[in-house]
Amino acid sequence: MPVELPRRRLLLVHAHPDDESIGTAATMARYVAEGAHVTLVTCTQGEQGEILVPELAHLAPEHDDTLGLHRAGELADAMAELKVTDYRFLGGPGRYRDSGMVWGDEGRRAVAPEQIDPRSFWAADLREASDHLVEVLREIRPQVLVTYDENGGYGHPDHIQAHRVATYAAALAAVPTYRTDLGPAWQVAKVYWSATPRSVLQGALEAARDRGDTLFDGVTSADDLGFVVDDADITAVVDGSDHIDAKMAAMRAHATQIDVHWPYFALSDRVGQPIWAQEYFRLAAGVAGPADPRTGYETDLFAGLDV
């Protein structure tokens, strides 16, 4: 018999430890606080990440190659801050390795490196990887699934692969005759892609410039950062204002990857980015629920569902 879970169930698919805290931590914390079951599936342990803490440089792949294990611990600490108890690695810890990335010629979009480790997530067989997620989808039976868009936000190959796996797995999980050994079929009602609206990031850039902040030196347009979408594409905004402290604590838990200085954080590129309590999404599948008449956006990812 299936395990009895809360009526509302949210499942998120992210590529590496820290991605969840940067993009969806406030949403995760809010739904946990509201009694929903939140499941995080992380596709790799982030073995190829650049390390911001000098005294931990020995963890790098060219030295001890133990960064993945360390980042798994950071993920556990971050989930404790968000009070998320159900978090897993796709196919189990270490099944898929971080593929790494390089910046494309224009410097705004990540691309896969020329040499790819055969163990990497980018090199994974799509159906095999998707079947691991099918099993989780059929176990948890989430009404809502969150992942990246087809570009993986900014082009990282693991983000793109996470999008592909989540999309394919959601379709396969709903087929009653497909891999019945992975559990009874389950149809995800709504699929969202996390997103950053152009106007929001542009406003943050201009406000920072007006205050004299220097973290954005050299960045004049939101488009320079390479991951914004048109405002018209946004369909939902989740207000996590009551959980911004938990979001920042979760981000700080990923100390090898994120440098947090409210109201900004920076990754290895040292380009400051705002920390938002409001997190934005695009509805990719399913039917939109009632929107806030003041903004035209859904304010609840479960809007319109009978749960």
Image (cartoon, helix red, strand yellow):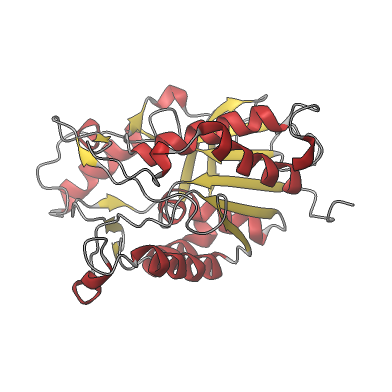
The one of 136 and 85 positioned closer to us in this rendering: 136
Measuring 65% from the left and 61% from the top, which residue is drawn there?
A: 33
Q: Quadrant of residue 200?
A: top left
Q: Is residue 28 above or below residue 305?
A: below
Q: Is residue 169 left or right of residue 9?
A: left
Q: Quadrant of residue 224?
A: top left
Residue 261 in view of the camera: no
**Residue 63: x %, y % from top left:** 22, 67
Residue 171 in view of the camera: yes
Q: Is residue 304 above or below residue 11?
A: above
**Residue 86: x %, y % from top left:** 64, 60
Q: Is residue 100 left or right of residue 288?
A: left
Measuring 30% from the left and 41% from the top, which residue is drawn there?
A: 116
The one of 293 and 130 positioned closer to us in this rendering: 130
**Residue 242: x %, y % from top left:** 54, 60
Q: Is residue 191 above or below residue 136?
A: above
Measuring 29% from the left and 46% from the top, which residue is drawn there?
A: 100
Q: Is residue 281 above or below residue 63?
A: above
How many numbered badges does the structure rendering display? 0
Q: Is residue 77 left or right of residue 264?
A: right
Q: Is residue 38 left or right of residue 45?
A: right
Measuring 39% from the left and 69% from the top, which residue is drawn there?
A: 70
| Direction front: furthest residue | 118
**Residue 225: x %, y % from top left:** 23, 37
